[in-house]
Amino acid sequence: MSDVVDVATGLEFFITGLGKGSVYALIAVGFALIYKVTGVLNFAQGWFAALFGLLPVVLSTSLVVSFEISPLVAVAITVFAGLLLGLVLEFGIFRFFIGEPVLSVIVVTLALVASIEGIVQYLVGPGYRAYPEAVLPDWTVPLALGVELQGPFALAIVFAVATVAALMAFFRYTVMGSILRAAASDQQAAMVLGVSIERTIVVAWAISLTITSIGGVLFAMSTSGWSFAPYTNIGILVFAAVVLGGIDSIPGAFIGAITIGVIEELGTGYLDPVVAPGFGTVLPMLFLLVIILVLPYGLFGTERIERL
């Protein structure tokens, strides 16, 4: 009987990790897409997810604004806000850094991190904000041995798989996808052939933050609300996932995020009581360190060879 209980516990940890990893995947895929097309390391990606996770609460309650709208409409507006913010960032900030040193762009993304964190702290503080019940899935997916998958994690798995499949089809079978691949491969050659680099960057940012908005909302749903603390680690875990999978690989970002989520949950469940609280969050970094020592470009990253 105890063996069955142990297997059920392990399966529960694994399934929860799979759900968490799928949420991370939605954010990580957006990160990888931006880097693949523009070469920008967007260290603000995790905080964009935090901002989008908070927005449905702001729109559907009187937390910040005096009017309240339907929670379902608030979620829809949040996804649209992701698309809009991608356009605003490209037109308002990153367009002016085309051709500038990489370090300059990294500093801009770090400035966005500080700005978003400061705005969120000022407006709502670090406290917990419950999500409206109308947008919280009250169902679970029954699995073997009595284990159940939470509704938000089930949605995250579906959205993550569908997103990666859609992006792969987009890059392979559409004209705009071919243009993005050309720009990602060699921007100068693409410009010679008449490709508008500005246009490709607009599309990349818009798609990236739209996907990230979905991940941010689903992460908040998985905890039934929004709070400041959980999002502080997301940026680090997402970056680890992208590096693990290969920083310019969209399928790699998906697989890396799933791996990070499972390792984090297994470490939290089995090693936190033995080693120290919080060790589960550190364990993915240790795993990443070992992998990078063996595979410097990650599992699916493009190996770059520079000759002097």
Image: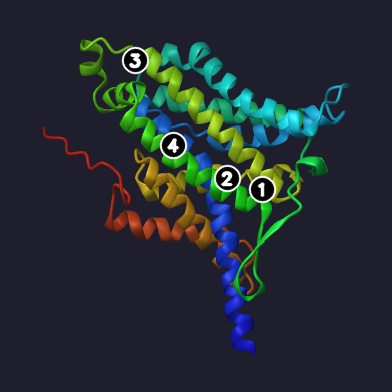
Q: Amino acid at mark 2?
A: Ile
Q: Amino acid at mark 1?
A: Pro
Q: In the figure, is residue 205 to the left or right of 233?
A: left
Image quadrant assignment for residue 184: top left
Q: Would you say the residues marked 1 and 4 are in contact, meaning their CB atoms lie under 8 Å apart?
A: no
Quadrant location of the C terminus in the rendered image: top left
Secondary structure type for disc 3 = helix
The Cα–Cα distance between marks 4 and 3, rounded to whole angstroms, is 22 Å
- Would you call the spot at circle 4 few (<14 residues within 10 Å), some (14-19), or many (20 or more)? few
Instruction: Give the label, 3 or 2, closer to the camera.
Output: 3
How far apart are the two marked residues, 1 and 4, measured between alpha carbons? Answer: 29 Å
Residue 271 at least partly seen: no
Mark 1 and mark 2: Cα distance apart in space: 7 Å
Residue labelled with disc 1 = 230
Q: Looking at the image, is mark 3 or mark 1 earlier in the sequence?
A: 3
Tell me: residue 92, above or below residue 218: above
The residue singled out by tag 3 in the image is 197
